Amino acid sequence: TTKVSSLLAEEALCPFDINGRDLNNISCLELAIQCSQPSLVSVLVGAKADPAARDSQGHTYTHLAVSCSPTAVCLPALAANGCDLDAPEDTSTKENMLHLIAKSGTIPVMKYLLQNGANVNALSGDGSAALHLASKSSVIASVYLLISQGASPNTRDKDGNTALHFIEAEAVRDFLVEQGARPKKNKKGKRPFDDKLAKSQIQLWKSRKTIAGSFELLSKESPKWCTGLSECMACSTSF
């Protein structure tokens, strides 16, 4: 870091492009991030290295910081020097780094992103927030963390779905409802839990049919017992 600072101080005598790339298409800032040197990152960005640049694979420097260090040690330095943590990582889906991490459930990195200014309610190209993506992927730890950091449980994607439309675990659905989630219909008129309710209705119908069939058989064999019977004497199920 000291040597780099000295070189930067001499830039007026020997100008060079701080955003230039070597033969491997790697910039100085990119190399500092790869080597997990946050202090060097701060020095370079302070000398006008571009934190919004991307590597040769098209990844943001946020992605680079996360992938090169299990604790993402360079993220605070990047965030403090103007790096946009909400920049789209995937140019086709417009998903940013928080979206991708929410799906994988890497909780320490999610905390780093959120603590350093990532927008918990940022939307992808189809209107999905990180909470939608965590719910679709059934990453329960991500759901709890995002809610604790202010994620809105009622944000809708382009189809009108909220996180409730994707949650399978009943305990998590109850948790979201406790946090203010409303089971509203999406654009297709489907309300959260509709499929599950439909399954339970079918199961109930099958049970009633079975019970009714049993009573029909009994009534044929012993008409005196079941004549005029319209509901189960044990559970009051109507036939």
Image: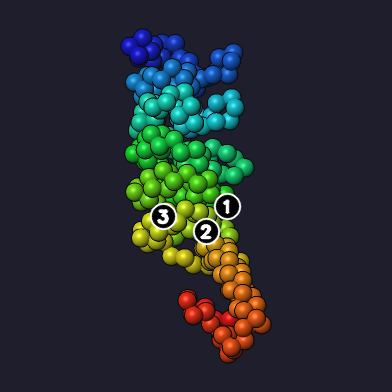
Image location of residue 153, percent across then percent down: 42, 57
State whether residue 223 is above or below residue 174.
below
Which residue does the numbered mark 3 point to in the structure image? 171
The three-letter amino acid code for the residue at tag 2 is His
* Element carrying mark 2: helix
* Element carrying mark 1: loop
Image location of residue 20, percent across then percent down: 52, 19
Color style of the picture: rainbow
Image location of residue 69, percent across then percent down: 43, 24
Judge from the rendering whether residue 152 lies leftward or rightward of residue 64; answer left or right: left
State whether residue 141 is above or below residue 3.
below
Q: How many marks?
A: 3
Which residue does the numbered mark 1 point to in the structure image? 126
Q: Earlier in the sequence, mark 1 or mark 2?
A: 1
Q: CA distance from mark 1 to mark 2?
A: 15 Å
Residue drawn at (59%, 44%), measured in percent from left and top?
93
Please tell me how crowded label 2 is: few (under 14), some (14-19), or many (20+) other residues with Cα within 10 Å. Answer: many
* Element carrying mark 3: helix
Residue found farthest to the bottom? 228
Which residue does the numbered mark 2 point to in the structure image? 165
Residue drawn at (41%, 34%), measured in percent from left and top?
109
User: Can residue 109 be seen at all in this image of the molecule?
Assistant: yes
User: Which of 181 and 129 lies nearest the eye of the viewer?
Assistant: 181
**Residue 39, quarter of the rendered image:** top left
User: Can residue 120 be seen at all in this image of the molecule?
Assistant: no
The three-letter amino acid code for the residue at tag 1 is Asp
Q: CA distance from mark 2 to mark 3?
A: 14 Å
